[in-house]
Image (cartoon, helix red, strand yellow):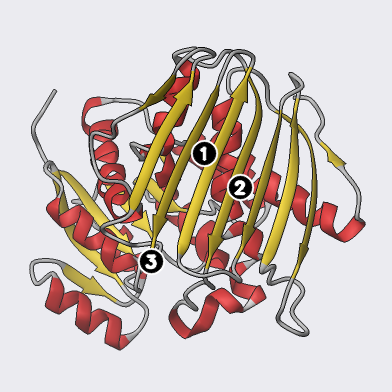
Amino acid sequence: MTTQSVRFGLIGYGSWGRHHAEAIAKTDGAALVAIAAASEQSRAEAAAGHPNCQVVADYRNLLTRDDIDVVDVVVPNHLHAEVGRAVLEAGKHLLMEKPMTVTVAEAESLVAAARAAGRLLVVDFQMRMSALWAGVKNLIDDDRIGTPLYIVIDLWRRPYRPGSDRWRFDIQRVGDWILEEPVHFFDLARWYFQPHGEPASVFACANSRQEGHPELEDNFSALLRFSHGGYAVITHTLCGFEHHQTVKVTGTRGAIWASWSGTLDRDLHPHSSLRFFDGQTLHDVPLDRPTGELFELEDQIAMMVRAVRDGEPVAADGIDGLWSVRLCEAAKESIARRAEVFFQRE
């Protein structure tokens, strides 16, 4: 084991990208050495915020540097496949914001590129790093409720931030709104049910309050069936207020209830709770650290450092990213066909 810093390059310096930059800069064992940003204003802000970094307009210039180990990619969804392949082909490890790509074919291509390059492909499913949502997984894995059979993941929130130049409201760049937040919940459901079986089918429905834009699904629900007989209900709305999420799991012996509430998704002082019933007694589980996406982002960077430097396993790899895109694509197909979509066993 060596104590040498893991050197990061960052591609994208929008509202979320700058949080990535701050997380890298403050993480022990990480060094932010270069930033690529598309707009002149973003480059000026990156240079002011991180004066010791090289700031470039073209991300390809960043990839030519020999002093970068990991590239963190935080760009609009439609660019993930192109930029991700370039990172891997340049011989760098890749940390990719969710969704990994906007199509299954692109996701399969990235997995193949990582395998060919012999480099890590890590997807930023930061909920897997959360003391709260990972706490649910720990209770399941510790056999506190028996075999999980039923999961409900529910989100009530206000509309999305538009993103730079309103890319999140442009179907050509966002891909689909199922890829924005439900992608996290598909990943959680699949993670919680492992190793009991992979997804077998999905049935979804959605609607939009935005006239002429049915692809921007303000309200979305899906029923995800698993091969062992368990199922998950994933539902969210962007027509609510504040940010409230719950995860409920029942098993053959007990049940889990986890909740997170804040005024915004990046609230630094949320209310969170984790409880489980073992069939006889109700337990409150204390959380050992704050929860929320800004905290989990820091944990994600630290995890990436340990993976590159010490060979530790990653939270979510390319196969996890591929599965999440596959589930989102199937949900979109289900909405269009108004029918259940089945997965072939692999």
Q: Residue at x 25, y 80 (%)?
A: 43
Mark 2 or mark 3, earlier in chain:
2
Q: Residue at x 63, y 65 (%)?
A: 177
Q: Residue at x 39, y 23 (%)?
A: 283
Q: Amino acid at mark 3?
A: Thr
Q: Which residue is mark 3?
A: 263
CA gap, disc 3 and disc 1: 32 Å
The answer to whether the residues at label 1 and label 2 have Cβ atoms under 8 Å apart is yes
Foreground: 68 or 150?
A: 150
Residue 83 in the figure: left or right of residue 239: left
Q: Amino acid at mark 1?
A: Gly
Q: Secondary structure at mark 1?
A: helix
Residue 226 in the figure: left or right of residue 339: left
Mark 3 or mark 1, earlier in chain:
3
The answer to whether the residues at label 2 and label 3 have Cβ atoms under 8 Å apart is no
Q: Which residue is mark 2?
A: 107
